[in-house]
Amino acid sequence: MIIKRIERGKRKYVTAIAGLQAFDVDIKKAAKMLANKFARGASVSKSVEGKDEIVVQGDLVDEIEEFIIEEYKISEDQVAIREEKGGKKG
């Protein structure tokens, strides 16, 4: 599973979670849980590779990692964190 911090302009970020399906997680339910837990917008979208991923507004990498490990009993060594630049300006 990969958690990515993606820069969307100068100080704006989104956090993307990819690969949850490998752990038999319903990603639509997971997106809704994350939106409620962190009071942020969250949606399911297609990644560049064409796979579903959850996109959450804001820089919440550490909080989301902790939540997913606790909620879905995924071990820390199965989680990779990445930084990505780019995206839309504005």
Image (tube, grey):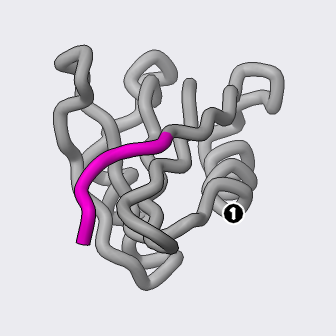
The residue shown at (73%, 57%) is 62
Outermost residue toward the bottom in this view? 39
Residue 58, horizontal then vertical, whole percent: 48, 70
The residue shown at (67%, 35%) is 81
Q: Give the prevailing secondary structure in the magenta stretch.
A: loop
The residue lying toward the viewer, choosing from 80 and 9, is 9
- Residue 53 to residue 16: above or below: above
Residue 42, horizontal then vertical, whole percent: 31, 64
- Residue 49 to residue 39: above or below: above
Q: Neighbour class for label 1 at 10 Å: few (<14), some, many (≥20)?
A: few
Q: Quadrant of the N terminus?
A: top right
The residue shown at (69%, 63%) is 63
The residue lying toward the viewer, choosing from 42 and 15, is 15
Secondary structure, mark 1, is helix
Type of residue at label 1?
Answer: Glu
Residue of label 1: 63
